[in-house]
């Protein structure tokens, strides 16, 4: 992969539904790939199975299409890579010039400069014996904390020893981030699924540069059909920086008991299983170009996720 490919990762929601030259370039290739399996996934054939362009692609810079696969099975992925590389050598792409304006164009949804980003990890631990291999995966996402929520925290810390976290932040956590996304793309929790969401915080220390907070939470979600749910606890600390008003040094860890599956997360362990969550502040370049999973398709629902 390092010697023969330029490896690129992109959000298919942005590359399908966004407004950019990257979107136009990508979707023109996808829609003209003449690949029956891919077009069936896109739902453009009778009985098509969906509307997503997700998967692995091998494409030349000039748009030459060398293959697509959406398998998690390693031997299939290696076979796909080998065939794509072979086809590339048989019919190499034409040389093209890419304009500076295209190289510098931002095509991803990025957080506002006042928004704090926290990276969220979910995994199943301990792993039950005999469960599907996909349960060894790690679910990754980004949590956005907005400036008005930080101001609510600061205001509350001036008047009370212990206070609830902002309702929108709590709603965002329990609906979109405290979730089993280990095996794929989960169904978001609906407001009616939230059975418990007790999140409280208190001020620990104040310095010239920051205020440090501690928070603790108990939460529970369950789908209407009772086939999917979880109950858990989360605890952590974070700073609010005096000069920027942003959250930094966010560290949290939680444990939950989960059961069931979402539409696109099959292969879950039987019965109830342990789901652990870790959260850490993020300000690296990746965190600024990868929006939260449920940012797309929710309108203001991600931003205003109050229960």
Image (cartoon, grey):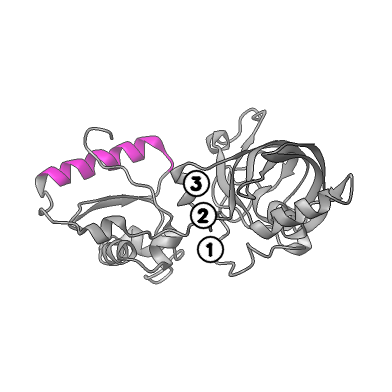
The residue identified by callout 2 is 291
To which quarter of the image does residue 32 belong? Answer: bottom left
Q: Residues within 10 Å of mark 2 (few under 14, many from 20)?
A: many
Specify whether 260 is left or right of 10: right
Position of residue 28 relative to residue 227, above or below, is: below
Q: Helix, strand or loop at disc 1?
A: loop
Q: Nearer the viewer, mark 1 or mark 3?
A: 3
**Which percent across, then down, holds residue 133?**
53, 34
> At 38% from the left edge and 47% from the top edge, which residue is drawn?
9
Q: Residues within 10 Å of mark 1 (few under 14, many from 20)?
A: some
Q: Which range is magenta?
A: 72-89
> At 45% from the left edge and 45% from the top edge, which residue is drawn?
286
Position of residue 64 relative to residue 202, above or below, is: below
- Mark pair 1, 3: CA separation: 16 Å
- Mark pair 1, 2: CA separation: 8 Å
Task: Specify whether residue 270 is in view.
Answer: no
């Amino acid at each position: 992969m390092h010697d023969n490919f330029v490896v690129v990762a992109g959000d298919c929601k942005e590359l399908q539904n966004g407004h950019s030259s990257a979107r136009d370039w990508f979707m023109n290739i996808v829609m003209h790939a003449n690949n029956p399996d891919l077009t069936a996934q896109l739902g453009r054939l009778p009985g098509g199975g969906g509307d997503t362009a997700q998967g692995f692609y091998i494409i030349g810079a000039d748009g030459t299409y060398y293959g697509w696969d959406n398998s998690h099975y390693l031997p299939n992925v290696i076979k796909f890579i080998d065939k794509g590389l072979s086809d590339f050598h048989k019919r190499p792409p034409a040389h093209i010039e890419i304009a500076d304006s295209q190289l510098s164009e931002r095509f991803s949804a990025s957080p506002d400069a006042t928004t704090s980003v926290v990276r969220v990890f979910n995994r199943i631990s301990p792993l039950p014996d005999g469960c599907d291999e996909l349960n060894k995966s790690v679910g990754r996402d980004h949590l956005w904390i907005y400036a008005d929520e930080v101001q609510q925290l600061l205001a509350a810390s001036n008047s009370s020893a212990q206070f609830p976290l902002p309702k929108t932040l709590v709603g965002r956590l329990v609906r979109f981030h405290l979730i089993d996304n280990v095996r794929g793309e989960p169904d978001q929790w609906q407001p009616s699924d939230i059975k418990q969401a007790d999140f409280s915080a208190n001020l620990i220390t104040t310095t010239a540069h920051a205020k440090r907070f501690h928070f603790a939470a108990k939460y529970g979600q369950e789908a209407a059909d009772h086939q999917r749910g979880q109950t858990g606890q989360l605890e952590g600390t974070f700073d609010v920086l005096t000069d920027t008003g942003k959250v930094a040094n966010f560290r949290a860890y939680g444990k939950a008991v989960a059961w069931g599956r979402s539409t696109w997360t099959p292969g879950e362990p039987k019965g109830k299983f342990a789901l652990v969550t870790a959260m850490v502040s993020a300000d690296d370049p990746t965190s600024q170009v990868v929006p939260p999973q449920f940012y797309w398709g929710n309108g203001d629902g991600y931003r205003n996720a109050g229960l």
